[in-house]
Image (tube, helix red, strand yellow):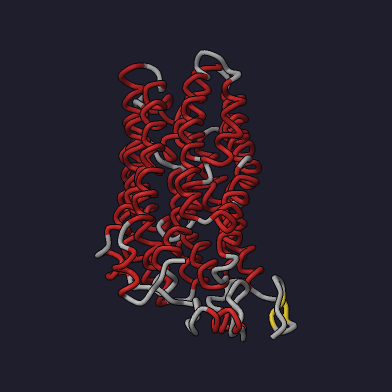
Amino acid sequence: MNKNLFKIDGRFYYGWVMLFVGFMTMFIAYVVKVNLSSLFYTPITEELGITRTAYTQTNTILTITMLIGSAFIGKIYKKYPVKYVLTGCIVLTSAVYVLMAGATSLWQLYLLSAIQGFGWAGATNLPVTIIVSNWFGPKIKGTAMSIGMLGSGAGALVWVPIANHVISTYGWRAGYLALAAINAILIPLSLALIVSMPADKGFETRVGDPSPEEVKAAGGVSTQKTGITGKEALRTSRWWLQWLAGLVTMIGASAFSTQCVAYFTDITGDSGQAAAIYAGALGTLILGKFLLGVFSDIFHIKRTAVIAPMFYAAMFIAMMMAASDMRYSTLMLPLYMIGGAVPSVIPFLITARNFGDKEYSVLSGWMNMAGNIGQIIGPTIAAFIFDITGTYRLAWIIFAVLMVVVGILYLLSSLTSKKQIEALGYKPQ
């Protein structure tokens, strides 16, 4: 069998087209949901005359329904074609943005956020993790995942300045309509290009799968679609430690993504400069996510998962120091390049490593639940601290400490349940 990174048996491997779709999902949907929401904090709270804590509850409500959706969205992706599930999620989230543009009170935003959460459960990072799991083998999975995930960094460089311009020039209502239009770009891409499994395109093996010789040398057990079930994973301490690590990671990450622009607007008095700092930080993820995936393949994901969160901790310290000296905002960028890549790369690679591909979509959906809970807690803590103290500095210190805890949790996870998982017929790589 003649195969390389781009061809299998002389044919171009369609998995690269699928990876492009995954990249575009992060480039558009992830950025719209995660990175553009912070642009609305100041204009909406000022027009409606509400506190930042009150407006933050739109994110809390959205995340609760997203959490509910994440409990079963993995099974839906497993049962139905990926293209139709993703398209349905994008249609729902885009339609809700159109309705949000006409909202006149906070309760309406609460209600619409609750509806939108169900769509976001299946339309952000979950599709790209499923695509990589289905189409790429263990030898290249980390690199493929990082390529797909770096779409969010590239998308932030494009969409943050555009959305900020629309909001600043035409108001937040026009901003919501812009988000609906941006998000809807994914609909024709999904319907035209997505194919669920390699077998649907006639591929019996994937790029990154071990060769027959490697399988034989390993004892004759293929690493394609092996592992343990979701129910079996739930009975291990390894699962709960990594799940908790994913939750704690998103406490800090979601606080950064929702409050960063407001924080630097307060410091500088210039929303344009604040948006530029935010976009610059997100832009570093273009390189950061790629590097984190490559490091995971070279140095092993179990080591990378422990070290990378320390960069995030240092980033929060630099962010806190920027309140006194804006030069620290420059130091913040290279630290965020690696640290900021942790939430969208590490949890899903560590899941594949720890439990295999057998029920990867289900396990990924459950990992999303951990992130969703973190997204409820983080922005609420940050906004509450601001409303009480008038500054975010204490919040950034708290989140720095939590990122150190993340590294410890991943370390403990890699040390537990090894014999238990091996007894179930899977040996973590």
| Residue at far top of view | 324
Regarding residue 265, the answer to whether it shows in the image is: yes
- Nearest the eye: 6 or 124: 6
**Residue at left 60%, top 39%?**
160
Residue located 54% across and 32% down the image: 171
Question: Closer to the camera, 422 or 247?
Answer: 422
Left or right: where does residue 45 sit relative to residue 86?
A: left
Position of residue 235 relative to residue 311, above or below, is below
Location of residue 204 in the rendering, given as x and y in whole percent from the top left corner: 58, 85
Number of numbered tags placed on the structure image:
0
Where residue 384 sits, quadrant-wise, is: top left
In the image, 126 versus 172, the foreground residue is: 126
Position of 357 compared to 336: left or right?
Answer: left
Using the image, determine if residue 257 lies above or below residue 324: below
Quadrant into which the N terminus falls: bottom right
Reply above or below: 20 against 423. above
Q: Closer to the camera, 142 or 303? A: 303
Q: Residue at x 41, y 31 (%)?
A: 400
Give coordinates of residue 283: x percent, y percent: 63, 40
Examine the rendered structure and indicate whether residue 307 appears above or below residue 138.
above
Q: Position of residue 102 (x, y in %)?
A: 44, 42
Q: Is residue 66 visible?
A: no
Question: Which residue is at the far right?
Answer: 10
Q: Position of residue 417 (x, y in %)?
A: 30, 62
